[in-house]
Image (cartoon, grey):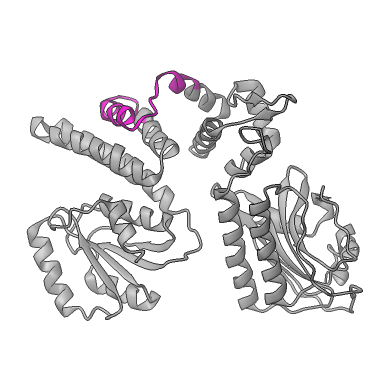
Amino acid sequence: MAERVQGGTARLGNTARPAAGRDGPVRDAAARQVLDRLTRLVSALFDVPIAMINLLDEERLLFASWTAPPELTLDESGVPLPHSICQHTVQSRMPLVIEDARTHPVMRDLPVTSDLSVAGYLGVPLVSVSGTARGTLCAIDPKPRTWAKHEIATLQDLAATVIAYIERTPERPAAGVEGLNIAAVAQRTGIGADTLRKWERRYGVLRPNRTTGGQRRYDESDVARVEWLRDRLADGFRIGEAAALLADDAATTPSSTSGLRDAIVAAVSDPDPRQLDALVEQAFTLHDVETALEEILAPALSTVGDRWRNGAEFIAEEHLLSEAICSRLRVLLADRRHAVRGTAVLACAPGERHALGLLALAVLLQADGWLALYLGDDTPLEASLALVRHMGAEVLCLSASTPELLADLRDRLADGQVPEAVRVIVGGAATENNQRLGEVVAGLRS
């Protein structure tokens, strides 16, 4: 979405850049400092006097952080969404590029255009894991401006950093108060505060404690329930149906690693596959990715796999569990984040069909800050190497489960002209590499 309109000039009186905003919806000092650094960085990179991070709160945009001239006063309560230019960025979930808002047929009459003396505007949405636009990161110039493609791409990268930080850094409660307020739960889950209140009243989804002043405070189990419901709605359930399932599961679903492992093994034989999917989801909701994989799902899969000798129906059970795990891992892998460590290409050896372990490694690498490019099973080595060279990848991870496939892979690697700077890791059942996946990830940090 791009608008290109030329026009005259409007200037702010003083373009000095003071420290970024100190009030607003982000109350934690450490988190606010991080966001302030980012708005100062945007101001410096784009040479603009105003840079802002705005968060959506129902029908208002709240100013989370800003850099602005000292004479510009911002109300920490934000602005009504319909009064802002950013409403179009939020609604479209696409970058909004405007050369001169003062002559734009839609933007020129908005209150914020005159209040902030907006001419050039570049804004990108802050999109959560669930696909919800949570707010915007924008750069504002008092002069008409043609924005370059690389500037748009840079602001998108910075916006990805902002939303990743916001979603992974829950708001800290005030001193002496345990738990999160409803705004922090909304921030963590991508579900609006008004919707959360309705779910609490109608379905008892949230079970808050109360402060001495009567304010609600929510804990991690509340967040986990909301995230579970959010994902069920994405699967096509109605909220009433999902809430009923959650109520049924709450009384019976274990939370410990051993309890979940045993429940998953038992659920493989359940005629309702949703029970197995819910338990796999629960493993990732209650535990970090490495714990869920290494201590719950891998042992469960091994136990189910040991039943193979007892008949074909047990082979089907192993495939059912494998697919349930792979489905969840693919969802996690699709949650792309800004890479900070480098690029890793992951592929199964030619002829190799067992890809679950490699997929799990891709998810762990991505969670650790890598751009994980997962190619799946039976990938020609030439294709993997071509992608390594094209992307400038630092790591190539390959998997082989039989001695024959491993020997063939090693022969191909010897003739494959692997770039010298690329670190090659070969794993799988046929290798002597007994490292846990988490140890492989840790080893790549050095």
| Coordinates of residue 189 in the picture (x, y in percent) | 58, 41
| Quadrant of residue 111 within the rendered picture | bottom right
| Coordinates of residue 194 in the picture (x, y in percent) | 71, 34
The front one of 54 and 107 is: 54
| Coordinates of residue 66 in the picture (x, y in percent) | 76, 61
Q: Is residue 260 above or below residue 165?
A: above
Give yes or no for residue 250 being in the magenta stretch: yes
Q: Is residue 68 above or below residue 150?
A: above
The residue drawn where x is 14% and y is 32% is 307
The quadrant in which the N terminus is found is: bottom right
Give yes or no for residue 248 being in the magenta stretch: yes
The residue drawn where x is 68% and y is 54% is 32
- Write down the region rendered in magenta: 247-273
| Coordinates of residue 409 in the picture (x, y in percent) | 15, 68
The residue drawn where x is 48% and y is 38% is 235
Q: Is residue 28 left or right of residue 87?
A: left
Q: Is residue 364 left or right of residue 226?
A: left
Q: Is residue 358 left or right of residue 244?
A: left
Q: Is residue 314 above or below residue 123?
A: above
> Dominant secondary structure of the magenta stretch?
helix
| Quadrant of residue 6 within the rendered picture | bottom right
Q: How many marks?
A: 0
The quadrant in which the C terminus is found is: bottom left
The front one of 357 and 15 is: 15
